[in-house]
Image: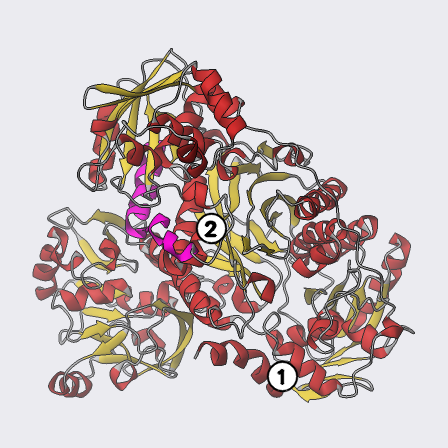
Amino acid sequence: MSKKVKITPEVVAEHGLSEEEYEVIQDRLGREPNINELGIFSVMWSEHCSYKSSRRHLSKFLTKGDRVIQGPGENAGVIDIDDGDAIIFKMESHNHPSYIEPYQGAATGVGGIMRDVFTMGARPIALMNALRFGEHSHWKTKQLVNGVVAGIGGYGNCVGVPTVGGETNFHKGYNGNILVNAMCVGLARTDKVFYSAAKGVGNPIFYVGSKTGRDGIHGATMASAEFDDNSEEKRPTVQVGDPFTEKLLIEACLELMETDAIIAIQDMGAAGLTSSSIEMADKGGVGVLINLDDVPQREEGMTPYEMMLSESQERMLMVIKPGKEKLAYEIFEKWELDVALIGKTTDTGRLVLKHKKKKVCDIPIAPLADDAPNLNRPYKVPKPLPIINSSDIHETQDYNDALLRIMGSPDICSKRWIWEQYDRHVMTDTLDSSQSGGDAAIIRIHNKNKAVAITTDCTPRYVQADPYQGGKQCVAETWRNLTCVGADPIAITDCLNFGNPEREDIMGQFVGAIEGMNEACRAFDYPVVSGNVSLYNETNGVAIPPTPAVGGVGLIPDLEYFSSISGAKEGDTLIMIGETNGWLGSSIYLREILRREEGAPPPVDLDVEKINGDYIRKLIRNKRVNAVHDCSDGGMAIAACELALTNNIGVHLQRSSGCPLHAWLFGEDQARYLISVEKNSVNPILTTAEDRGVKAYIVGKVGGMNIKAEGAFDLPISTVREKHENFLPELMS
Amino acid sequence: MRTAVITFPASNCDRDAAVALRKVTGIKPVMVWHRDTELPKDIEFVIIPGGFSYGDYLRCGAMASRSPIVADLVKKAKKGLAIAGFCNGFQVLTEAGLLPGALMRNKGLKFVCRPEKLEIINNTSRYTAKYNDQSEVVYPVAHHDGNYYADKETLNKIEGQGQVIFRYKDNPNGSVNDIAGICNEGGNVFGMMPHPERAIDPMHGGTDGIKLFKSIIESI
């Protein structure tokens, strides 16, 4: 596209800008924009970059806390984990590209989230991912699973950061829009955190990393629109990743960060050079002059428009202290990376671009950021589905069959086929990962006697049935997962995946879920420190189930005291912490056995969550438990099976309450933990629980080689394991 | 004793190798950059670490095997310097001609990461002498191209001369004769796809790897 393109209403519309938005642009410029300027406004004001539908709602989140060093608004969130150590983390979606080109879409999702983290001075130490695919029987699913998993592994394995956990769901609601949410956790020093504010005038701006090509142009705009039958034609807007360059960038940036050369640094993610330069200038209150001829280019004849909107991967922008240029060149050349001085900060407050000695863009920076649309879209929070009494839900006549069907169902089955393709051990600080089937990954802080626990969670069927309760549940479950390993939960990141916000009911799901999430955050003093929003996850007008994926991080302050799903021993007693009322609405049992997707989801009582979780952590610190497992999808029966499989030892459940047997076994009441304890710990645990107002019941014992429940099922571990392990390999073969 | 770890662009187990060496020798190893033309003086044991040197572009280990430092290693290996390559390091050693055979794409075509049971075939080698009371170890594997291949003649030779040091109990990658680790004729150069450096701490789930490092260090 040359700059002579005439700006017609069609061109404006093609850029995803409304008439009103275009008027604001003209007003701020005092003239018509040229095509470069229009392109820049269009990406900066896209849903993806501007959060125009979500901003006012996100602002309600709890974002501050004693350990929060940096909340939302930077590349990633930063928390304090004592001793001068900081954890920097974020989760981000790469949904639209992954559906169109699964390998590259997922790979660049991993690359992008890692850059967000090391940009701030952290060495990435762990990767997680939350994946949602369509029905397992859908013709496209297998190919998408194959590509996404290979892409995540291909990138993370090469860079040498362990991929340690996550979750994978299958549901027809994702047939036309899969979700690929990647999370990265990094370690930095609290006094060495880097920000993006480009302070000072006349400072050199460096471009580092891969050359700029024509890939990914308008990726951010693509992520801000619905799909239709022709979406696959958008393959050229998917970026291509190069993990080798990423690895070099990490090492080079961290090496340069050891010096005092960097004033500001920002990765080029969505909207590439445009958004990175504008964000840096806006935060630093300066202007920017860039000479596009100096930008390293992969292809000949690139126009300013293409260069500014390219989403080529593995590129960074940094403002260097004058006088330190030589040092920067030396380090980047050592790592064989392209590096170029492409501009400088100015006092004009404007973004000025030069190309072939001509000025091709001159726009004030403040409106790009400050005047970005902040919409108040109409919304209607959907009414929760009606409550179903468990006594109105059919009891299975064959518990053995029901148990095996659930254990071998797409959501519950072993995900070994996936996580065996990820290097989980590189850096040798992985103490627990997907391999154990536990609740949270545990990553030791290198050379220290402490660790971080990491988890991701979301139960979309609950959010679909009741956005508010479902929103609370996502946050509560991550908090519970961290608790299970003995970590103090600190903060979360989130990836809010929803449909088209222009529809009242979708916007209502969004608002309802945020309200629930925020309430849980406040109850647990568990702030949101980073995240992203992915809207327009719709194809031909069909939206995905609302999926606010949450990534939680906690601290295990002393490795003497942590726990996991492993450790149950012959002769142990199983205790359920928390009340079992047999809630079957929106449960896995109802869906997998009775094929019904209905009913209000289990309510989340945040006070009860809090006292139960605090008690579990106390038991772990007092070394009172051998193993702990969160009781969630599939209820007590599934939690007990998972415990048995991990420890390769039988379990025997005995009913502790008066609710119907199937509801007792498969009910998904919240705030529950299954713990395996030595006989002589039973009474002290029950007594202390009572004193603290915590409900605790003996529900069975550990031993033998069968998984059984009185009056229900009785199966050898090997039979359950076979069913659990075989589903995915058979699907993917 | 002075030891060294080589770092290529996109080596990613270099730190892990250094941690293992420090644990066993008590002294930090020297980290040597791939562009250096010579090892520092008095180095007695070198590890070529795992990773994706040069992004695994062209062929795994191919570009790294042409780097200046490897030229020096080839020279010194002939004089008896002890060199071990794990994972990508093994690929580099075969590409450099210091070990026989080649490593191809896994039979299942996928990256595989899991703890792997290995049988110690030769526990009199310089790398396994400390395992005299043990016939099996568990080390994790994590690779995409670990399918060991050598022609019949080479196989007969290395099998006959005790150069096959480890075999997989449950072959994860299609390696011929289940071969997991081999040494050269002199016994000073050793390569394996599994990662002994990831099994040196009870928190890794096992410490079987320590004796491998002890064996070679004490043999010097």
Q: Residues within 10 Å of mark 1 (few under 14, many from 20)?
A: many
Q: Circle 2 marks a residue in which chain?
A: A
- Judge left or right: residue A134 versus residue A400: left
Under mark 1, the amino acid is Val
- Majority secondary structure of the magenta segment? helix
Q: Report which residue position mark 2 lands on.
A: A94
Q: Residue at x 27, y 30 (%)?
A: A304
Residue A519 position, x and y percent, is 75, 42
Q: Residues within 10 Å of mark 2 (few under 14, many from 20)?
A: many
Quarter of the rendering occupied by the C terminus of chain A: bottom left
* Residues shaded magenta: A231-259
User: Is residue A249 magenta-colored?
Assistant: yes
x and y, in percent, of residue A230 in the image: 42, 56
> Label 2 sits on what residue type?
His
Residue A391: % across, % down: 89, 74
Question: Front-most of A499 and A700?
Answer: A499
The label number, if any, that marks residue A595 in the structure image: none
Residue nearer the viewer, B200 or A169: A169
* Foreground label between 1 and 2: 2
Q: How many marks?
A: 2
Whether residue A585 is visible, yes or no, is yes
Residue wearing tag 1:
A720
Mark 1 → mark 2, Cα distance in angstroms: 35 Å
Asked which secondary structure carries label 2, the reply is loop
Does residue A624 appear left or right of residue A290 in this picture?
Answer: right
Determine which quarter of the picture holds residue B106. Answer: bottom left
Determine whether A485 is above or below A185 in the image. below
Q: Which of the pair B104/A213 is nearer the observer?
A: A213
Q: Say whether residue A363 is magenta.
A: no
Residue at the extreme top of the image, as rendered: A347
